[in-house]
């Protein structure tokens, strides 16, 4: 039974399933007209989040050239928030979740100590709400 289960597992996980294969074919050979529109949409969202992050005291962010993540340097915000128990990107991300209901990813696991990771694969409205929450948090935490 173990030998048969091993063969089954090997065949089930060693390659993409048929549905994924058909989706990949369609993605490569199908209508590509939406790609340019998606690229423009992501560029607009990227510019929105980068500009907004750079307006928040204690936060600086360079414009990413790919993907849909921003990785702002929040070191100055962390430093100014030490009296509130914030000592690194992990405690900052926990505080953002607890205090303003904002989910972000600490940058330390990506080798970016003092940074947070934000996704802009969401609506402009959601990005603006997130920026407002981060700005409010930054103002209240450093007072």
Image: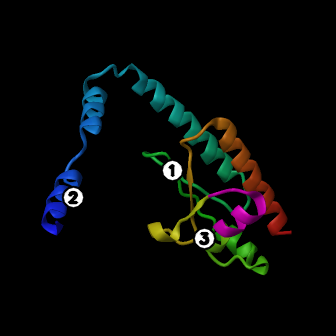
Range of the magenta residues?
93-103
* On screen, residue 72 above or below 91: above
How packed mark 2 is, by other alpha carbons closer than 10 Å (few <14, some 14-19, many 20 or more), is few
Q: Is residue 101 magenta?
A: yes
Q: Which residue is mark 1?
A: 69
Question: Would you say 34 lies left or right of 91 here?
Answer: left
Query: Which residue is at a point 29% across and 38% down the rendered structure image?
Result: 20
- Front label number (3 vs 2): 2
Query: Which residue is at a point 29% across and 35% down the rendered structure image?
Result: 19
Q: Secondary structure at mark 2?
A: helix
Query: Which residue is at a point 26% across and 31% down the rendered structure image?
Result: 22
Q: Position of residue 72 (x, y in %)?
A: 58, 58
Q: Nearer the viewer, residue 93 or 46?
A: 93
- Distance from disc 3 to disc 2, alpha carbons, whole Å, reads 39 Å
Q: Which mark is residue 89?
A: 3
Earlier sequence position, callout 2 versus callout 1: 2
Q: What sort of colour scheme is used for the picture?
A: rainbow
Main SS, magenta residues: helix
Question: Would you say 68 lies left or right of 2 here?
Answer: right
Q: Which residue is mark 2?
A: 9
């Amino acid at each position: 039974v173990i030998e048969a289960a091993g063969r089954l597992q090997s065949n089930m996980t060693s390659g993409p399933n048929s549905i994924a294969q058909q989706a990949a074919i369609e993605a490569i050979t199908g209508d590509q007209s939406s790609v340019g529109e998606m690229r423009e949409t992501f560029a607009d969202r990227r510019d929105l989040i980068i500009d907004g992050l750079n307006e928040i005291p204690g936060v600086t962010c360079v414009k990413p050239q790919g993907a849909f993540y921003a990785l702002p340097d929040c070191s100055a915000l962390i430093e100014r928030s030490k009296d509130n128990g914030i000592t690194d990107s992990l405690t900052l991300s926990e505080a953002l979740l607890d205090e303003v209901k904002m989910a972000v990813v600490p940058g330390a696991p990506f080798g970016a100590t003092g940074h947070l990771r934000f996704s802009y694969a969401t609506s402009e409205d959601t990005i603006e709400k997130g920026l407002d929450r981060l700005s409010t948090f930054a103002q209240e935490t450093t007072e």
